[in-house]
Image (cartoon, rainbow, N blue to C red):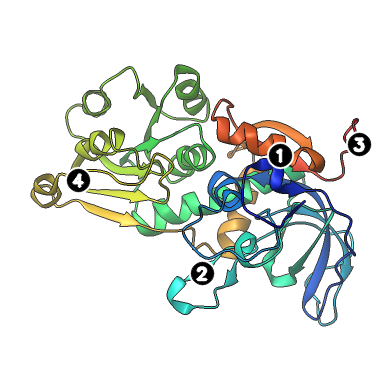
Amino acid sequence: MVIREFGPPSVMRLEELADPRPGPGEVLVRVHAVAVNRTLDTVVRAGKFKRRVTLPLVLGIDPAGVIVEVGTGVASRKLGDRVVTSTRVQSESAADGPQLGSVHAWGGYAEYFKAQADGTTLIPDGVDFPIATVVGRHAPTAFYLLRDRAKLASGEWVLVMGAAGGLGSAGVQAAKCLGAKVIAAAGADERVNAGLALGADAGVNYRTQDLTAEAMRITEGKGVNVVFENIGDPDLFPKAFAALARNGRLVTAGGHGGGIVPLDVNQLYLKQITVIGATGQTTPADLALSLQVAAQGRFKAVIACILPLSQAPLAHELVESRSILGKVVLDPTLHDTNE
């Protein structure tokens, strides 16, 4: 599914191209699932990504599938291995920091995907391909943000914003795995309930309830220790910020709600709050841990639907509509009845 110009979902076109061949240190993966992501897919496709994007382009971060060919020098992988890939590549400009595969390298919206062997992780038994691609995209980032950046400790309270979204639902579960108590905050009752079903201890509908007051009530007036934020909404951000306790930390890796927000600097220094901005600089160990937790039934992927590759434009429309609960996944092995 190739993009040769930026624009609406219809700019993605199904094309027949030569199968890629793995070079030294590479493997060829038959793609069975690739998640559709808001920022790294729909925003990139629309030409609104904050960093330079090179066209033509095939989207798709972290596809999952089966290795069907192995390049020279690869000893860690073999034919038939079930893997999920991590497609981070280095930017041409070191100042840009680590880039993502869908920005400078062709991704997984395709039948076959060429990957560095050391950028693949084996999928444990009991984890299917759609779950692997969703868990692989969001769970390692959630663990990194909460454990490594926010320094979340067992027993602390975490307020997870957008708790039914891809990263938010991962945040709820990662926080519980780390021993925290979780408030799932979302903008509709069904989305709050989804967060509760994932293990959250309490929930708040921030469109119908006072977010700050509810967080204070739940924590018996103490406030939350960590806010896990990836919305950047100018109305919601200050309410979440005001719910932080003294020495609280707010960690953010997204700005779907606009990204420009007011900040109460008086509270920032009086409460000695730390605001942390981070991207998902995760490790293969984080991904392996996330998949193992999923195999143990302790981490669930919320999936709305699985569509054939030819319906990628529809998949983008669904994601951009914000009307669905869970991730949309493409499966290139499925065939559209209209093809």
Which amino acid, by three-letter code, is at mark 3? Glu
Labels 4 and 3: the sequence-earlier one: 4
Q: Which residue is more in the foreground, 184 or 315?
A: 315
Front position among marks 1 and 4: 1
Residue underneath mark 1: 313
Mark 1–mark 4 distance (CA, rounded to whole Å):
37 Å
Residue type highlighted by circle 4 = Leu
Mark 1 residue element: helix
Above/below status of 150 relative to 129: below
Picture layout, residue 143 above or below residue 171: below
Q: Which residue is mark 4?
A: 263
Q: Earlier in the sequence, mark 2 or mark 4?
A: 2
Q: Nearer the viewer, mark 2 or mark 3?
A: 3
Q: Camera-side residue: 298 or 307?
A: 307
Circles 1 and 4: CB atoms closer than 8 Å: no
Residue position marked by numbered label 3 in the rendering: 339
Q: Which residue is mark 2?
A: 98
Q: What is the CA distance from the residue labelled 2 to the residue labelled 3?
A: 38 Å
Nearer to us in this view, 319 or 119: 319
Q: Secondary structure at mark 4?
A: loop
Whole-number angstrom distance, CA of label 4 to CA of label 3: 51 Å
CA distance for labels 1 and 3 = 14 Å
Judge the density around disc 2: few (<14), some (14-19), many (≥20) Cα neighbours within 10 Å.
some
